[in-house]
Amino acid sequence: MKNKLGLFILLATSLLSFSCEKILSNLLIDTISNLGSSSNVFDQISSKKDTETNYDIKLSNIVVNEVSGNNDGLLNQNEKAELSFVFNLKKIVSAKTTVVESIKTNDTKEAFRMKANIEEKKVDSLRIKIVNNSSLVEFESADFYTSNLSKIESPKIYLKVSNTGQTLKRAPISIIITDNNGDITNIKAELLIPAISNSFSIDDWNIDDYYGNNDGIANRGEKIRIYPVLRNSGKSNTNNITATIRFSDNNLVEFSQIEKTYNYNKIKSFSESIKIEEEPIDINISKNIQPNSILPVKIDIKDDFGNIWTESSNLKIEKIANDISVKTIAYLDENGNQDFLPNKGERVKLKVVLENTGTSPTNDLKVEIKSKQKFLDISKPELFVERFAKKYDSKLSEDSIVFQLDPNVAIGDNYPISMKIYDDFNNSWNDLRLITVFPVAYQLSITKMDI
């Protein structure tokens, strides 16, 4: 009786150990097998084993080498790429099998004893087959063998992504892994094709006002060339971008061409690019257009994969950013006493010094001088002042006007003259000055008489 009880306890203990070990092993295998892995390129959805093994294998990475694309490491639509699938094999707790054999005892009763713990079969090579299950990508199924279990990587697979549109798409694939013992692991995964993450717009206009004041701003009366500054506000780099801009007809603006396509080789994410074309759009802006007028522009931006962005923009004709005034006036008494002051009865030359207190250079300027005073006879009413470039620069007129002071004017009288300053582009400024009649700076007396 004691012998039977001992054998029963031994058998029960062995079976319990076997069951616990089996449950723990299965639980661990199932847990690891169902762990998905993911990246910006793929999601591993599931991993299922046909039989128990003492290892777990999963898809750990997909290396993307873009043959034609924006080199951001992703599978973007319409791109062509070479893929390398990388797998990670990890050994887990061995699933041991406990074998019990029957033996005969002295009293011819059957008893049981532990025979052995048999280890799992050794794995030294794998066959991996990758199958495409989607119409969103094109690639031939890959089938390869490897015995390097520390670094499992597929040969390069050439893949082409279709035009998938504006939303994230998933391309399912199947991976069948068979080891040298015939045990199979099935992996379900999805290749990720992100939505278009670029956003293009005309950020600014690069303006060459080659017939104007060269301040890079479109002003009325100028002839300009325009180069659109294209900005990529998205997360991906782009190649081979075109921007087609179209203006509407305007009777105050003359275009060399109403529509023009500008080409951009590459625009990085969150950056901008200026494209200098050999034949840009030339615009001849009328002198009669009102400052701060708006020229509407339609823009179609396209990449080499057929994605299109349509934008609206404006080209503003701005008020010229300079402010011209008379800084000083200089006198030269042509037939008087040469004291550089206007005295009554003298014929005086007047030169004008203009000052620019604005932020833009000036164009060539003219000064028209008028007076309603009958005591002033202005024989040449217009001066010329050559352009000058900087803010707070001043420049003397190259020529002068001549006026005659009546001999009957009173010393100390002030005679107003109006000055209209204008350029060839219908920009004008007004100033007012007073001409003061000075007494002669000498006094005559008879000191001696010769008889």
Image (spheres, rainbow, N blue to C red):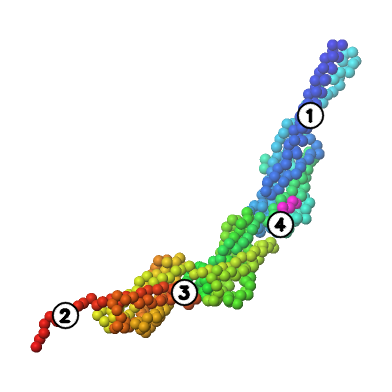
Classed neighbour count for the residue bearing mark 3: other residues with Cα under 10 Å, few (<14), some (14–19), many (≥20) = some
Classed neighbour count for the residue bearing mark 2: other residues with Cα under 10 Å, few (<14), some (14–19), many (≥20) = few
The numbered disc on residue 445 is 2
The numbered disc on residue 112 is none
Percent x, y of residue 83 = 69, 51
Q: Distance between the residues labelled 2 and 4?
A: 101 Å
Q: Distance between the residues labelled 3 and 1?
A: 97 Å
The residue sitting at 56% across, 68% down in the picture is 316
Q: Give the range drawn in magenta.
A: 166-171
Q: Which of marks 3 and 1 is nearer the N terminus?
A: 1
Dot 3 amino acid type: Ser
Name the residue tied to disc 1.
Answer: 22
Percent x, y of residue 321 = 48, 67
Q: Do the residues labelled 3 and 1 touch (CB within 8 Å)?
A: no
The numbered disc on residue 166 is 4
In front: label 1 or label 4: 4
The residue sitting at 84% across, 17% down in the picture is 8
Q: Earlier in the sequence, mark 1 or mark 4?
A: 1
For residue 253: magenta?
Answer: no
